[in-house]
Every structure is written in C-alpha cells, then in structure tokens.
Amino acid sequence: MIRKYMNERRSWIILFLSLQALILVIAYLDASIPLQSIFYIVFLSFIIFILFLIIRYQKETSFYKELDMLGNGFDLISLEEARTPFEKITETQLTEQAKYYKESLSDLLISIEQEKDDLLGWIHEVKTPLTTMQLMVDRLEDERLKTQLNNEWLRIHLLLDQQLHQRRIPFIKNDLFIEVTALEPLLYKEIKDLKSWCMQKGIGFDISLQKPDALTDAKWLSFMVRQLLTNAVKYSKNSDILISSYEEDGQVKLAIQDAGRGIDPRDLPRIFDKGFTSTTSHHDNAATGMGLYLTKKAAASLAIEIEVQSTVGEGTTFTLTFPKKNAFVQITGM
C-alpha cells in the first residue's frame, strides 16, 4: 500500500522536489542570499514534508485498505466510514452498485429456480404418456415393430432421465442419503431396463460380485451405473459386459468392462468434459456428450473416484472406487 500511495502522490512529491531545487538554484545564483541558511530551510522542509506524508498516509489509506480487503464480495458493512469527499463519493457508488448487483443476482437466481422447476415439472408430465406408450407397445404382436418401438422409447426415457438429473446435480448435496447399498439388485434393475436394447445387439452380462454392497447413495449410484451401462451397450455388439466388485486397500471397487470399440488415447483426457462426444466418430448426432460429464459430477459429490482404461478395438473398463467410511464425514458434514 505504501508503494501505491507514493505512486498516487507522485505529482505532489515531484512538485515539492522541484520547488526545493528551484530555491537552491536561486540561492546559488544570487550571492546576496546566504546559501547555508537556504540549505537549513530546505532540510527542515524535507523533514516537515516527510512527516506530512506519514500522517496523510495513515489518514488517506485506512479507507482504501478496508476496501482492498473486501475482495469480490458485496458486503460493505465492514467498510470504514468515509471521511473525505472523494471517499464519500467512492462509498456511495460502491453501495449503489452492490445493491444493484445483489438485486440482479437475486432476480436471476429466482428465474433459474423457476426455470428448473418448470423443466422438472415438464419431465414428470412427459413420463406419464411415456408409461402409457410402454404399455401399448407391450401389447403389440409384431415382434420386430415391438422391438424397434421399445428401443426408441428407451432412448427417449434415457434422455429425459439425463435431463432430470442434470437439473438436480447442482443441488445434489441436499439430496444425498448415504447408506449401505446392495449392489446386486441395483445392477439387475439397470440391466433389466436395457434388456430390449441388449437383446437387439446380442449383448449379455457376466456379473461377479465379491463385495455385495458399498457405502454410498443408492439413487445417484444407480444414475452413474445407468450412464456407464448405456455407453457400454451403445458401443458394443455381440459380446458380454463384465461387471465385478471387489475390495482393494480397504476400498470397494465396482468395474464395468465392455468389449466395444474402445476410446482413442487422445480422447481419454476429455471424455468427462461437458459436451465432448468423440474425435473418431464426430458425426454421431445421437451422442449428447453429457452422460460421462454428469457421471463425473455425481461421483465428485459422492467422493467416488473414476478410473478409465481403454484400448481401441478391444474395449473399455470404468472402475468406480468408493471412499472409506470416514470419508463420508466430509460429504455429510457430520
């Protein structure tokens, strides 16, 4: 702050030094003026000026020091009361701006919350006719048409589910319920929902659960598994998807391995980025680039680590590593 103050008052300091230099030059040129007395006066002037700067520094910078400590916040309550006219102008303008931005932010948050509620309501409304459509499709006798409609119905259902969870993710901390979750029924439910798609593509499942349960949130784990299984089925054909759970270093791990096309090494660092689809199949309009992004976001809130191993042409393995029990103290704050 001292350097900033000196730089701010640089013109004053230059003016003072110039005046002192002018006095010395006049005394040197005019023999009638005693040079020693002038030196004494200049010396006293320097002492007085330095004391003046110190006093003014204390008075003029206290307000701006407080202002500098506020950072990016809008809270001006702790700001020291302005004393000088310029400080009062600054305080008034900052107060008005803070009030304006607080009101704008509040209106924006209300608007976003309303938009979220409207979209969630719409999604729930759409689910009703979708359920009806599912019942109607089940009554069809043409198996080929039935399979095609089931696949399209499933695609719509998964996209709506993705949108629903995308809107909930920012508030996931309010929606967590950590408990011992049985993995087998959770996995079988997700596999059953993908049954028609898997049958069409000739995909089976090989499940081996050495660890039958994990400490986590069942609903959000289901969502994560759903995204990973959907990806595995989408990029596989006529092969089995291997699902296993085991314990390593005191942590439960859940691995989902497919024998699909694999992920290009240059894509691996970006697969969890929002909107990223692929560089090898960039023309794939069906991909949204949101599934793995949302999975990563949910995993972060549950303190679950996701590891990816993939070989082009051989398949991909996603491994979820669940945190140890004491790690949930950080999640729940208890």
Image: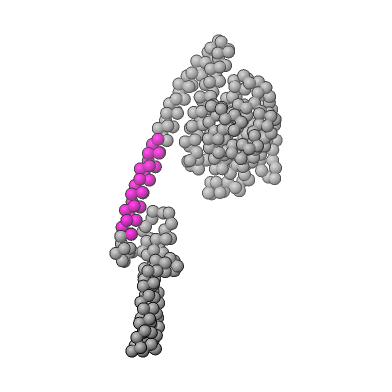
Q: Quadrant of the image for the N terminus?
A: bottom left
Task: Choose top left, top right, bottom left or bottom right for residue 17.
Answer: bottom left
Residue at image x 40%, y 74%? Answer: 54
Q: Is residue 140 magenta?
A: no
Q: How many marks?
A: 0
Residue at image x 53%, y 20%? Answer: 152
Q: Is residue 93 magenta?
A: yes
Q: Which residues are magenta?
A: 90-115
Q: Residue 202, position in %: x, y?
A: 65, 20
Residue 317 visible in the current orientation: no
Which color mode does the image show?
A: one colour
Residue at image x 62%, y 44%? Answer: 323
Q: Residue 331, position in %: x, y?
A: 55, 46
Q: Residue 42, position in %: x, y?
A: 38, 82
Residue 297 visible in the current orientation: yes
Whether 296 is drawn above or below 189: the answer is: below
Q: Nearer the viewer, residue 251 or 282?
A: 282
Q: Residue 294, position in %: x, y?
A: 54, 36
State the residue lying farthest toward the left: 85
Query: Is 71 displayed left or right of 195 in the figure?
Result: left
Query: Is 320 displayed left or right of 64 in the figure?
Result: right
Whether 321 is drawn above or below 25: the answer is: above
Whether 109 is drawn above or below 155: the answer is: below
Task: Choose top left, top right, bottom left or bottom right for residue 281.
Answer: top right
Residue at image x 47%, y 25%? Answer: 127
